[in-house]
Image: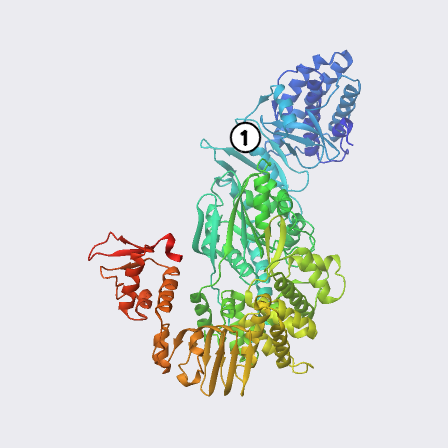
Amino acid sequence: MLTIADLVAAPEPDQDPFRTLVHVEYQLRVLGLLCAAADQRPAKFSTPGSLEKWADYSRLQSEKLGCTKCREKALAVAAGINTLVVAEPEMPIRQVRNQVCHGGPVPQDVDLAALHQVVSQNAEWIVQIYEHGHVVELAPLFRVVDGRLAALHSFSGTAATYWPRRGDAIDVTEHDTVAALNKLELQRGDRLLNGFAQDIERDLKGFAERDSVCILVTPPEPIVVRWDRRSSDGPVPRVDRFEITADHARVWLSESGQKPYKAFLADACNWPLLKRRLLVELEEQLATEKQVSQDLFPHLQQHIPHVPTLVEIHDAYQGTRTGLTITQACAEVTGDVNAYRGSTNLITLTGEAGSGKTHSLLQFARESLTKPGDLEPVAIYISSSKSSATSLKQLINDRVAGTRILDRESVLALCRAGLAILVIDGFDEMLGFRTYDNPLSGLRPILDDLRNNGAVILSARSSYSEARLWSSLTEHPTKNSHHRLTTMKLQPWRRAQLLELVAHLSIEAAVTDDAPEVQQLLTTPFFCLAYAAWQQANQSTNFLRFVIDTYLQRELTKLEGQQGTPLFSQDELADVFCEVAEMSARKVTPEISEEELALAAEQALERDLSKERKRRLVALCGMSAEWSDEELSFSFTHLAIAEHFFARQVTRVPLQQALSLLSSVAVSPLCAQLIHSMWPEDRTETIESVVAEIQTRVTAADSSERCRPAMASLGELWARVAGPAEGARPACRIIVDRLELRGSGRVTLDQAEIRTLVVGPGVTLRLTSCQVDQLDLSETSGDALLHDSYKQVSQLLTQNELTSSPRRMRELLGVPEEPVDESAIEAFFKEKIANARASIVVNERDFPPDEDVRMRWTREYGIEKWRDYVKKMVKDGKLIREPVNAAGPSKWRLRTTESFDD
């Protein structure tokens, strides 16, 4: 650990005289603080102090040392600043130091030997004073940080800054240190100027040669900073002056006049050159993105237009807003970057895979770099993709190294000044940095260094990191840095955006597959491009299969290890997704846990995953990640993708596993269609035999309630296999959303539940114990319906009419009128009243309004039957007429009583 001797030790004799002069002041600071530490109630001193002030304080406070020899040594050190080190004209150390630190030149003939003699003797005497035992406790005037002893530089009343012999200043805000310093009742200098000086020193760490910054604060004079700017041609010495105006504005006193402080930082980094180099780096990123698109969509030869995506944005100032494009939202962030909020704006941009996060941020960065204006903020785009960085510091350094101007420190300095917005794309894609575990801990070094200024945009495909950030901000509201969270969520594309894209590419905008799950894919920009490529390539492949294959290729470009080698093949990744789809389907929930995802992958690959593969799969599995109930869960971003991989799993696993799946999971119409189209022709078992086997299992079940998933799978598959077939086709216990009977022959359905049943010409239908919501006979005649099948139909659609009236159905089908007893009529009306969704309102004759189509059932047996029923129920006290307060003729509401069901 460094000691007092290390702090004051003399530098090498051949060191630059300027740095030796600065060290003399540092020695006097250490001496003054040691003298103060030797006294329980030391005389007040001000921070940060200066050469003369520390010399004066050391002379005053040395009386408290209680030792004549030590006091004499302290006085000798203080007097050392009057030692002549320039002969012609005569100039002592004090005068030379002030000239140099105020921006003047270093005298030509400095007596280096005399100067070195002073600092060497000072070091010896100060160590002897300390080792004589006058100081019992160094704290709080000195502090050890990371093994380095540092001396107090300044104290504001709420925070202290300590300077080690070498390296960066250390800010301390912990309660015990601040309380101990407050007890000393230090005299504070100009807090605004001192704070400004500290910020200048902090900002220059990214632009200056190491240990070259010397700052002089002597109110009311301007701050003087002597430093060496880093450049490719070597250090460039500079002297700059700063002051604070009457309205507290921080300004740079440049050679051409007073300018905003940010203009100094822009000058320090050669702003025009930096923007050009950042643009060159960005163009390489854009070229990479374009190449990926060309590799995925080789048939899209035209320039793909930029179609802005809409976002939902939420912040603490304006709440939740919708209807903004991502371009407008980023413009708001830019406009807000210089507004004082007392906190760093941490913006999360989330969206599913393929929603356009990278494309949008690249466009934002490009526009910021090409926009006219000298000091307009620029977006510094940092891609996490395929980075081996283990920290954000390393990531930023790696990504901006190509500018040969910036590093992490200078990037953050520009962000603090409002000259730059840090954009980290793919926050969840870093290879060596598990941002999923605790996003805020990874960001904290960045946020703390921004010191409640600037803006940072983080993009991720999951809302997990965003939710964890919210959680961390709530749990730890008293951290050193204050930051507010703004969330931007990319919204699904609307049809207008799809039309804008396809119009530019001169293709049709109609998808032949009308499955809503497939249509939903076209709300994502990536899938819209895939659709455009599919159209232009005139692919014979099914659209969904083409999209999925392209989707897998895209994911594989991200699933690479640190050496750039693929972690999975396309078939392996597809197999993993198939296992995930099965696992999700069996759980009857769309989400699976992180452990289940890894387990599914190991089952698919039939081997244990390496640590790297497991971590990368979790971070970039091509699925959405959500945070709920303190754990990470995964689900497919689109239902159509889940359906595809489940169907793929059914067709690839052994027969018994496939039957188990189809018996325990109710497949959707889309999934059944995919299973039918994907079924391998070279499999021993045909799809027809699979349907027959499921039928056997369903028929053998004790109760239909116990096999409803199997009934649904059977129904949807039977609709694809037997629906268009020829000849007699029986089916029992099937559940179907839409069943179209084509071909010819007799179809017999027993105990079937069908939402829409379409009967084509040449087909006859016999229903027994079925429930059909709508029977469509518009393509045939009533003769297609055999026996009393119509009794199991709720609605009948013919070429001319849609009816739900049993009496009208019989008329349309030519079925003779059946005698109906009064009890059946009463039961019919009673059931309709009990299930009515709206109030039953009648006029004084108990007739419902003619225009109310919901009440047509009251005329099922003639209006007089309805009137007689109402009168009887009112008389028996089972219905009550309540007057309705409304304009026009009198109306009554019929309300049931407790005895209605008796």
Q: Is residue 399 above or below residue 798?
A: above
Task: Say which element carries label 1.
Answer: helix
Say which residue appears at 49% left-offset and 45% top-offset: 337
Instruction: Give the residue drawn at x 39%, y 77%.
Output: 797
Q: Residues within 10 Å of mark 1 (few under 14, many from 20)?
A: many
Amino acid type, callout 1: Leu
Residue 567: percent from the left, percent from the top?
71, 64
Could you tell me if residue 747 is visible in this image?
yes
Viewer-proximal residue, 25 or 644? 644
Residue 611 picture location, percent across and down? 74, 57
> How was the colour assigned to the protein in this rendering?
rainbow
Q: Nearer the viewer, residue 587 or 652?
A: 587
Q: Viewer-proximal residue, 233 or 279?
A: 279
Residue 79 seen by the camera: no
Front position in the image: 48 or 858: 858
Drawn side of residue 319 relative to residue 110, left or right? left
Residue 669: image x %, image y %?
Answer: 53, 72
- The residue labelled by disc 1 is 193
Q: Which quadrant is home to the N terminus?
A: top right
Q: Position of residue 24 (x, y in %)?
A: 70, 27
Q: Image height check: is 809 above or below 311?
A: below
